Image (spheres, rainbow, N blue to C red):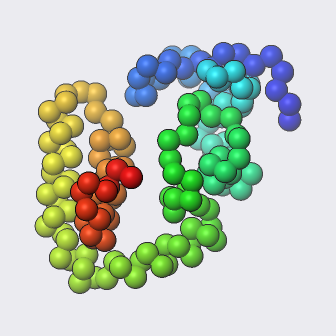
Amino acid sequence: MTISNPRPYPFKATDELYVEPRFEQLRENEPLCPVRLPHGEAAWLVTRYEDVKTVLGDPRFSRARAVTEDEPRTRPYRGLPGNILEFDPPEHTRLRRVVAKAFTVRRVEELRVRAQAIADGLVDAMIAQGPPADLVAGFALPLPVTVICELLGVPLEDRTR
């Protein structure tokens, strides 16, 4: 499918939590919409839940491909190529099995109190910042990374690398 006459990307990039009213119009009238991304590339905007599920389940739209190939993106990629979170099965499954050996029931139970303290601290930080809160950036991403770093004994000064 080729893209002809894509419209400018319809969402403001200033606040990731804001959704323009035009999104509802597109979802109702044009669920598969050609758009032009901020950096000039043409892309398809998929707006309906069932269609999004189909796309996300299709290996042609793999997250690993976006990391390793020059795929169109709305902003520069900030991840680390080769990161286990960026792989698709079967490579992700193989690496997850290796890492899972460190997550014994006993070791995880020992970290339960510390994990709760980390979670409480992240929630407190979001409350202190005031609304709106970005649950993904402020809690869902840093919580598992911090707990895993503590589980594996990664020093605090090395965690941002």
Residue extending farthest to the front is 157
Residue 75, position as x, y percentages in the image? 56, 31
Q: Nearer the viewer, residue 23 or 138?
A: 138
Residue 113, position as x, y percentages in the image? 13, 67
- Whether residue 87 is visible, yes or no, is yes
Q: Identify the residue at horizontal 63%, vertical 43% (top origin).
A: 52
Residue 54, position as x, y percentages in the image? 68, 49
Q: Is residue 74 left or right of residue 6?
A: left
Q: Identify the residue at horizontal 57%, vertical 53% (top origin).
A: 81
Q: Is residue 100 left or right of residue 74?
A: left
Quadrant in the rendering for residue 130: top left
Q: Is residue 107 left or right of residue 144?
A: left
Against 68, residue 73 (above or below) is above
Against 30, residue 137 (above or below) is below
Query: The N terminus appears in which quarter of the rendering?
Result: top right
Quadrant in the rendering for residue 39: top right
- Count of numbered circles in the view: 0
Against 150, residue 48 (above or below) is above
Q: Identify the residue at horizontal 31%, vertical 71% (top origin).
A: 152
Q: Nearer the viewer, residue 153 or 86?
A: 153
Residue 122, position as x, y percentages in the image? 21, 46
